[in-house]
Image (spheres, rainbow, N blue to C red):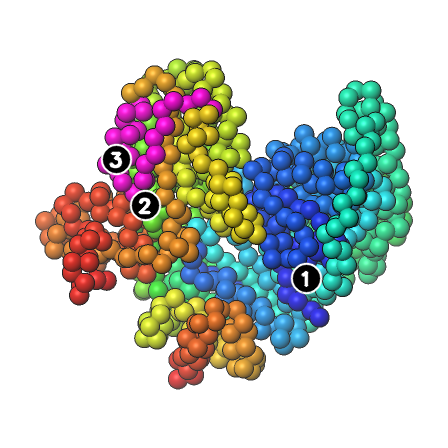
Amino acid sequence: MKRLLSGNEAVARGAWEANILVAAGYPGTPSTEILENFGPMPGIYAEWCPNEKVALDVAVGAAYAGVRSMAVMKHVGLNVASDTFFYAAITGVESGLVIVVADDPGMHSSQGEQDTRRYCKFARVPCLEPADSQEAKDMVAAALELSEQFETPVLLRMATRISHSYSSVELGPERTLEPRPEKPTYEVNTGRYVMVPANARRRHPIMEERLQQIADWANGWSGNRVEMGDTSLGIITAGAAYQYAREVFPNASFLKLGMVYPLPARQIAEFAAQVERLIVVEELDPVLEEEIKLQGIACEGKSIFPLVGELSVETVRESAIRAGLLPASARPQQVALQMPALPPRPPVLCPGCPHRGVFVTLRKLKVVVNGDIGCYTLGSLAPLTSLHTCGCMGASIGVAHGVNKAGIQQKNVAVIGDSTFFHSGIPALLNVAYNGSSTITIILDNRTTAMTGHQQHPGTGYTLQMQPAKQVELEPVVRALGIEHVYTVDPYDLERLEVVLREAMDRDEPSVVIARRECALLPSVRKQYTPLRIDANKCIACGSCRRVGCPAIHKSEEVYAKTGRPKSEIDPLLCTGCEICAQICPVNAILFRSQLDAQPEEKA
Amino acid sequence: MTRNDLTTNFLLTGVGGQGTLLAADVVGLVGIQLNLDVKKSEVHGMAQRGGSVVSHVRWGERVDSPLIAAGEVDYLIAFEQLEALRYASLVRPGGIVLVNDYRIAPVSVSSGNDVYPDPAAEEQAYGDSLQRFLVPAIEIAQRMGQARVNNIVMLGALSHFLPAPVEVWLEVISGRVPERTIALNRDAFAAGRAYMQK
């Protein structure tokens, strides 16, 4: 039976068919849906962890204890988990361990486009890379077999275009394994699993030798395949790049790699000998190209194709035309349109977003804002422009503390989401308390991991499978870390928010402001939407409401006679009724919900 | 040259939250029902937060790239007028552009820094090189009592141009929307199709 599955769905299905028992991860685009898909699957235990390092430790533990396991994260998540990644490569594993890492070429939703294949060479971990959903599913089983045969973790490298593209998949047989009822004895193996120097010194040569064996084995692996065509051009490629190259060069010869580290040297040499011109088409870094050149084989790669950004049929084709590999006539005919200037439409904080109240207030208070990773990073965009630094998960609090210690004129705050605070904000806040700075940490507690699509976390009270769980409350955690001044406010209440922030700013000691209000996209909140309305007779066209940056507010065709400027209007299809604009309006022209209720016949 | 002539390429564009991804799902599944090779691609995450959303769907005997190259889009289905303009140059000469008669001002426009293209400029942009159809999908959907199904109205309009039987579309849609809204969505599809056939 053929099914249309995304790469992420296919990985989850592959894990299920291949009898994986334990899976763990932290949400991160484009990897999130893999773990989400385990939710309803019988027989797999899957969990959201506070961060990727914890998740990888969990998967390693399960593999040490003799079951097949999987850890899932986005590329920058592996930075967080890298300490574990390296020790797991040295100890190796008993049962299959697959680490799924999704890269984001083009940075659709990331702060960088680092190439995870580099990590594999660094840590001596073999790396498989699928080119469509079928391969994504099948490579989970292949990775597990490889992992068990050579007692090593195996990395499955996904990319946005593989994770979020759908293609047809022939499903395999259903899983055969049930959770272990017999509870086997844990086999102690101190020499292997305790990485004190004496043991690590013994393990290092084993790891190097293992890599050589895998490279040799890869020469005969069916996942590395030759598709011979016209021998005037030979192309070595992998992943999404293979699909673009296939489309641009339908008649060329291909060596399509399924294992991108280590490389099958013999197979590459044989292929190279059969073609006249050898090129490498790969996304991001010249990882394959460098390895092939180290082998002493001449090839062209990044001298033709871009190193930066995501590849596409166009970029591969244009690069090939420039390099003389294709005639200019290979370009499809395109229409020439007389296009007016098009305003960009970057992502914005949604209508009703509780973060908006915080950013509107921070803008007013003119403080320096150290941001973090989440929807609230969008507070940096016009017209809010009230987020001034953002580097990676958990960075906000440490950076704010550093700015504070450096001594500046303005007040300086950190903003961090609830999920991000649990992820890596806790040690940083502990540092603020311990080393004492007057840093104000604002925890934007929208009760979910919003950016990646509403995943559960330690503060939501539910597990990945939506079972009730211990709900960790922020206030006691923050107090236990040593913070004495803790405020909880509703970010829809602008007046109270400002009073609290001003009070915190007057202190010489650290404080935490928890701005608590559910994400406006949660289904329970959607049910309560009540679109507001602007009384056009009262509107003085000052534009204050439009400067809160809400997509539901736009210019009206009606003009205010005194100034000739356009009045404002609210789109009832978009407005949630959060009332932030109504609190900002200087002439009370925006009706509050209570006022709408009083005039139901005029309700929009 | 590089393109299999049996391939049909659909580009669906809109603003995050409009139901663009659901519509693309339906187009992809219809292709599967027709026993074609199908690839579909979209971007999630940050782009979904009220930003410009684009989904590629390709039907064919064999489809390689999950993305459609510029100049190879056969059908552009846009759920918002500015998002139609943004991608119109990717459509092949003579290709079909279905535009929802609906505008959402980007925040840069409502805050006064940018200008939304006026209807005359829009008209001029398409010229004679593309076949553009403006579909009042919001109005049609609102008449049925639920503006949100405007995406399905648009699919009904699209179906007019394709050989796939109506029953296949309806079966796929019914399997893809909440059960209590099946009848509404079927009606929305029929209304969109009827509008195009007038």
Residues packed near mark 2 inside 10 Å, few (<14), some (14 to 19) or many (20 plus): many
Q: Which mark is residue A549?
A: 2
Which chain does the numbered disc 1 sit on?
Answer: B
Q: Is residue A324 left or right of residue B49?
A: right
Q: Secondary structure at mark 1?
A: loop
Q: Amino acid at mark 1?
A: Asp
The residue under the point 49% across, 80% down is: B160
Q: Give the position of the C terminus of chain A as an image quadrant.
A: bottom left
Q: Is residue A590 magenta?
A: no
Residue occupying image coordinates x 35% and y 68%:
B147
Q: Which mark, residue A496?
A: 3
Helix or strand or loop: what does disc 3 sit on?
A: helix
Q: Is residue A421 left or right of residue A287?
A: left
Question: Contact (CB < 8 A) between labels 3 and 2?
Answer: no
User: x, y percentage for residue B156?
Assistant: 46, 76
- Quarter holding the N terminus of chain A? bottom right
Q: Looking at the image, is A527 positioned above or below residue A360?
A: below
Identify the residue under disc 1: B64
